[in-house]
Image (tube, rainbow, N blue to C red):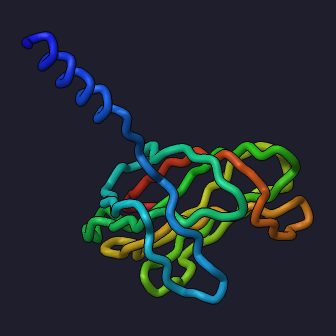
């Protein structure tokens, strides 16, 4: 009897350990200014010039992150920088936008050159503290034409600091 109970508990523990973290959210449609994320919210605070790893994901077309709440500390959380590495199957342009939530207003935007892999930095500020933001990743072909099926792998980091 004890072996059966142990086996049952062991099976439940194994089953519950199969979980994953979701970084993706529903894509923002072009005719909609507000997108409700599928994953949970996060709170971001001061990092100085240290970049905190957020996550990696595979995407096609575009991806809008869950809402990020910037802690309301006007002396430290003035500038938000997103740093992203990307790898695509063919020459592509990655555009990253820091978007204010829920207004949809673009606070900052940056794009890569047309390449199969690279890095993009974008900084918003000096008044980012206390805001809620989402990060929009958008992939286009080397001519800037959007294709919702264009695949790309993204890894990204953030930093929050008081001076730029």
The correct choice, above or below, for 50 with respect to 36 in the image is above
**Quadrant of the rendering where the N terminus is positioned:** top left
Name which residue lies at 53% across and 84% down: 105
Does residue 9 show up? yes
Image position of 142 (left or right of 7): right
Q: Position of residue 131 (x, y in %)?
A: 36, 75
Q: Which residue is at 43% across, 79% downward?
A: 101
Q: Residue at x 57, y 51 (%)?
A: 83
Outermost residue to the right: 143
- Which residue is most to the front? 1
Q: Quadrant of residue 2?
A: top left
Left or right of 158, for residue 88: right
**71 left or right, relative to 54:** left
Answer yes or no: is residue 51 visible.
no
Q: How many marks?
A: 0
Q: Position of residue 119 (x, y in %)?
A: 69, 47
Residue at 60% in and 63% down: 63
Q: Is residue 150 above or below residue 116?
A: below
- Foreground residue, 117 or 75? 117
| Along the line of sight, the residue nearer the viewer: 45 or 6 | 6
Seen from the viewer's position, the closer of residues 25 and 94 is 25
Residue 99 point in image, percent of width and height? 52, 75
Q: Quadrant of residue 139?
A: bottom right
In the displayed orientation, state which residue is furthest to the left.
2
Instruction: Return the residue nearer the eye: 148 or 14.
Output: 14
């Amino acid at each position: 009897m004890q072996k059966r109970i142990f086996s049952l508990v062991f099976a439940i523990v194994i089953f519950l350990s199969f979980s994953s973290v979701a970084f993706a959210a529903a894509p923002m449609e072009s005719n909609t200014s507000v997108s409700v994320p599928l994953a949970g919210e996060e709170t971001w605070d001061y990092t100085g010039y240290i970049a905190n790893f957020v996550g990696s994901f595979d995407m096609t077309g575009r991806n809008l992150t869950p809402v990020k709440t910037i802690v309301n500390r006007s002396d430290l959380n003035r500038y938000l920088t997103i740093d992203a590495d990307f790898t695509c199957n063919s020459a592509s342009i990655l555009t990253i936008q820091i978007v204010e939530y829920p207004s949809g207003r673009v606070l900052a935007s940056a794009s890569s050159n047309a390449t199969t892999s690279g890095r993009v930095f974008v900084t918003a500020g000096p008044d980012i503290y206390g805001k809620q933001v989402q990060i929009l990743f958008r992939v286009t072909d080397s001519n800037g034409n959007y294709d919702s099926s264009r695949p790309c792998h993204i890894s990204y980091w953030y930093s929050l600091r008081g001076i730029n």
